[in-house]
Image (cartoon, rainbow, N blue to C red):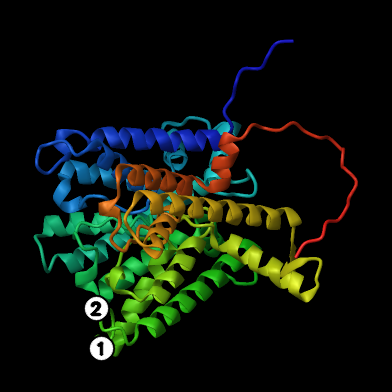
Amino acid sequence: MQRRPFQMRPPQILTIGFIIIIAIGTLLLSLPVASSTGKPVALIDALFTAASATAVTGLATVDTQTTYSLFGELVILCMIQIGGLGFMTLSTMVALIIGKRITIKERLVIQEAMNQLSLEGMVRLVRSVILFTLLAEGIGAVLLSIRFSSQMPLGQAIYFGIFHAVSAFCNAGFDLFSKSLVDYRGDLLVNLTVIFLVVVGGLGFSVVTDIYNKRSWKRLSLHSKVVIRVTIFLLVMATVIILALEYTNPKSIADLPFGEKILASFFQAVMPRTAGFNTLNLADFRSATLMSIIVFMFIGASPGSTGGGIKTTTFAAIALAIWSVIRGNNDVELFKRRLPIRTVLKALAIASISLLWVVLVTVILLITEQASLQTVLFEATSAFATVGLSTGLTSDLSVIGKLLIALTMLIGRVGPLTMAFAIAQKGGSKGLRRYPEERIIVG
């Protein structure tokens, strides 16, 4: 019997694709031309930056503005765009431009990359994603360029506007100001523009497309309704918690005007949705606030978006399953619909694998780094959820710490379950065989 040639499955293609992009980025960023001094950046720092940009995280072991030249910054910008949209989305766009037919296997990879439920309309979705991305980033770039033009030459303002608009929409968090957006803490235009880009980028392209096509709450899909409801709930909850816990903290917002307190709290509540910008120094936050942000980072954005985390729908499925058990219901219900048990099990698997990885990384970092538990846990969660927020540990990481965080960012971007599928062997079909059911005692 002739053995079938090895064929990579969609999860393997996605994982290897991101690894190749990181490798190319590392090579480019380690070139002398990519450095502002003309001397090559250390290979480990180039690797870390490439992984962070491709995973649209924003964590950096070196300052982007002072370390990299214009060439290096453009390389980072390209990797952010590729990482945010996904290389399959961009390669499909190129194929459509040159008139190449999109095969079934390519559609399967796109489906895996965008977390879609079916193959129907994959190419149409890619077109919508590209057009919407260009529109959102274009509007954001214009607004930010107008604001920056009052502080710098027009050409530089346009470049800064484009860079930060792409970084915000892709939920990357890379900036060219050395201390993020701290100087714009009370600037309404900059804050609201960045918040808009981050939230829209984190909703998921299928949700945005659904909103545009349906334009009615009743006609929206169950997925879109859950994403919107959970997103609003998390944003309001995070804003209230940060405002309440930091209201009297003299190191953060205690001395700010009331309006600026609300704006700063809202901005910092949005950023754990996997965008690493900040207008306040997180190292000055109280421990309770940082622990709350860790929870919000772990949840992250929504499926099929530019953000990371276990995703809003995963959080919703688990929360509803717990509520159903408490109420004694056999079904997980919402919006007069019943979730399939497989969906709930998948959500539990994603959350469990994610939690185990974050704990493992935290334990290892506690061994390799000289930092507190909360600082290390914050860093590990931020890397896994591709957030990019830090309390200051990133630049002090050891070589082992940098490699571990880089790997964590990759896993967070690809997705823990997708990574597991890529590594695991494909099991054979059991056909119609099912074993007898028997209960065990739990609880």
Residue type at numbered disc 1? Pro
Q: Secondary structure at mark 2?
A: loop
Q: Residue 170: which numbered mark, if any?
A: none
Say which residue label 1 marks: 257
Q: State the residue in front, 372 or 238.
A: 372
Q: Residue furthest top?
A: 1
Residue type at numbered disc 2? Gly
Residue 159 coordinates in the image, percent (x, y): 19, 54
Residue 361 coordinates in the image, percent (x, y): 45, 50
Q: Quadrant of the C terminus?
A: bottom right
Q: State the residue in front, 403 or 339.
A: 403
Contact between labelled residues 2 and 1, with CB atoms less than 8 Å apart: yes
Q: State the residue in front, 284 or 135.
A: 284
Say which residue label 2 marks: 186
Query: Residue 97, can we see it?
Result: no
Residue at position x 61%, y 17% from top? 5
Residue 353 coordinates in the image, percent (x, y): 58, 51
Query: Residue 13, can we see it?
Result: yes
Q: Which corner quadrant of the image does residue 340 belong to?
A: bottom right
Q: CA distance from mark 1 to mark 2?
A: 9 Å
